[in-house]
Image: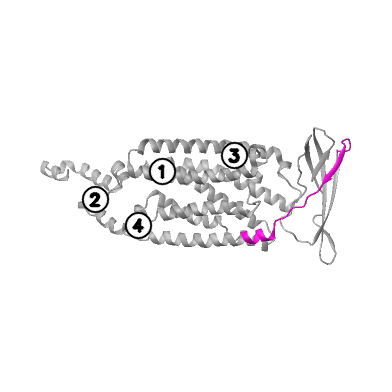
Amino acid sequence: MIFFFAGENIEKNFILSVELQGQNEDSIVEPLSTDTFNHTRTLRCRHEGCEELIIFHLGTIEYTSYIVNIRLFGLKEFNVQEITFNWRSFNPSFTQVEIWFRFVFLVMTFIVTCMFAHSLRKFTMRDWSIEQKWMSVLLPLILLYNDPIFALTFLVNSVVPLMLDSVFQASFLCTLLLFWLCVYHGIRQSKRKWSTFYLPKIILVGLLWASAISLACWQQYQEKHDPTYDYRVDSGNYLAMKIFFFFFGGVYLLYLLFLVIRAFTELRTLPYMNLRLRFMTMLMLFVVAISFSIVLLRFGIRVLQDNYISQLSTYYKNSAEFLTFYGLLNFYLYTMAYVYSPSANAHKDSYFKENPNFAMLNDSEDEIIYGSDSDDNVHTSLTGSHRYHDDTDDETFK
């Protein structure tokens, strides 16, 4: 709904009363609710026009036609010249494209996940690098990100599939944020205790995950039971959520920047480590740059306004935007799965690594710098039994 005034600058609160009725194929009119939906809305107008107001939103179309009775209270003293009503809906062709591409990405991700797991079958988890361990977590999560039950959104008149879709997307994206923190920190640290290494990162990312989940699920639940619900009705709560999200998001960015700079500073002289860091950083920056560019093109400066959170949802304006987001994240995981998969002769190389005569030839740089667990155990046992050997034995162990 768009208002037009005669060149006035106003900001006025008024009451919007909406009564919704549905008419089926038999011309029988049924009310969507026994109560009339009343909400206080704010109308903001400038010389060039007024801000658009969303009257109601229907997640599913259950009737062939709808009868809407709208009443405005508190605008009698203003010179309203014209009110324009716009009806917007999703294109059925776009819905089919979204379902098919989600299914294609789901099948491709399942194949990539099986191939990656098959490549690691000959190695124990102790031999996996930190990137391979995280890939074994991210690949199953991106299966959920592609939402195997997405078609239920159109087949079942329930808010549960929408909520699950929001949970799946938020879980994968937050796990990806956690992956970046752990990899940049863990690549230069061999001992990773749960309380000191993982717990602070999980708490930081978990706060972002909780805010995204609560916001998306609450809005979808409210829209299901109240079609006239809009985030502007709870502007105070959304402002608090905005401050909360930006604060911890800023903390995350500063922490990640600190870990990236420190990792490059400490490991830039090591060719193997430097190559790992450059690959991860270039791929991460590419994904972040493309995603940030799409968000700016879609929302502009409104990203920094109060309505930015509610519009960053699972809905997309066109097929190109949907394919860019989904294709970018899926192919990002596919690329990392290919790069971090063991080579064909990796299992043979591990045999020589177990042989003491070839151990130093096959040690990785992180083991040379930080040492392995087996080396620490041998060193501890030798130190503990040092007094039981003579000098000749000590020289032999050295």
In the picture, the disc for residue 278 is: 1
Could you tell me the amino acid type at mark 1? Arg
Q: State how far apart marks 2 and 4 are (Cα).
A: 19 Å
Q: In the rendered image, which residue does mark 4 sit on?
A: 343
Disc with the residue nearer the chain's start (2 vs 1): 1
Disc with the residue nearer the chain's start (2 vs 4): 4
Mark 3 falls on what kind of element? Answer: helix
Q: Work out whether 196 lies above or below 63.
A: above
Q: In the rendered image, which residue does mark 3 sit on?
A: 245
Instruction: Say which of 113 and 93 sits in front.
Output: 93
Q: State how far apart marks 1 and 3 are (Cα).
A: 29 Å
**Cβ–Cβ under 8 Å for marks 3 and 4:** no
In the picture, the disc for residue 359 is: 2
Disc with the residue nearer the chain's start (1 vs 4): 1
- Image coords of residue 343 (percent x, y): 35, 57
Q: Work out whether 194 lies above or below 163.
A: above
- Image coords of residue 74 (percent x, y): 86, 38
Could you tell me the amino acid type at mark 4? Ser
